[in-house]
Image (tube, rainbow, N blue to C red):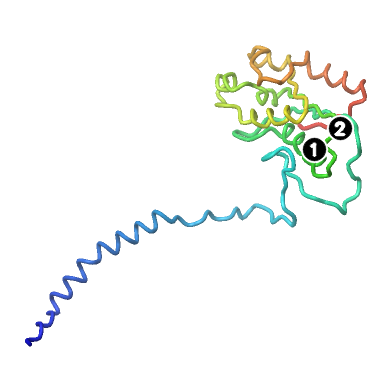
Amino acid sequence: MPRPAPSSPRRSLLASVASVPLLVALGVSCLASDPPPPAADPTAPRLSRPLEFPLIEGYGSVVALPEAEERPRIGGRVVFDTTAAAPAGKANRGLESAARLVNIYAQEGMTASRPQIAVILHHNAMPSALADSAHERAGGGSNPNRELVERLLAAGVEVWVCGQSLVRGGHALSDVIPGIRVAHSAMIFNMNRQQDGWASLGVH
């Protein structure tokens, strides 16, 4: 039986060259479908304990500290007196602090006996109380605090806004997220609550 003619060096070279585009295409396809993982933020601290969200998911993270002193007590009343503006696209620190206190008590199994909690938003914090439509008219897009406000209200936290700040900011009293209550002024609100025995924590 005659043997098949051996391939010429030229024919083998042409076959190898013809396969290069296919290999390149396969490599590009693999790269496109399997992007590398994002680089870790080098400025983020390494946490020795995991963050938890016992009741309000996604806001007010806490860590378990069973060996720490000054433990949560039953009862009490506290106002988060908030003037700090919220960073663009992020939650307001006063609202987040209220969520953290809720989560601290939930983590300790003390939700039913936690303090009464209220937040009063005024001055630079006032826009955090606006409904999406009013927030958009003010040039801020949809309000990134709406979800957090709704979760706080569902958890029994009072959320208030200063009526003086609303009007001075060009808004109607009805321009707030549903469930937020309007105080005559933050000064009057804080005076009344202190006379009623509420502690005050400033978020400025």
Q: Is residue 203 above or below residue 167?
A: below
Q: What element carries label 1?
A: helix
The amino acid on which the numbered mark 2 sits, given as a three-letter code, is Pro
* Residue 139 falls in image quadrant: top right
The image quadrant where one finds the N terminus is bottom left
Mark 1, residue position: 101
Please report the residue visible at 25 percent of the width from the left and 66 percent of the height from the top.
Answer: 20
Mark 2, residue position: 115
* Residue 48 falls in image quadrant: bottom right
Residue 43 location (% of width, % of height):
64, 53
The image quadrant where one finds the C terminus is top right
Asked whether the beta carbons under mark 2 and mark 1 sit within 8 Å of each other, the answer is yes
Please report the residue visible at 64 percent of the width from the left and 31 percent of the height from the top.
Answer: 147
Q: Is mark 2 on a helix, strand or loop?
A: loop
- Distance from disc 2 to disc 1, alpha carbons, whole Å, reads 9 Å
* Residue 105 falls in image quadrant: top right
Q: Is residue 190 above or below residue 96?
A: above
Could you classify mark 2 by the number of other residues whose Cα lies within 10 Å: few (under 14), some (14-19), or many (20 or more)? many
User: Left or right: 33 with respect to 19?
Assistant: right
Q: Is residue 75 above or below residue 39?
A: above
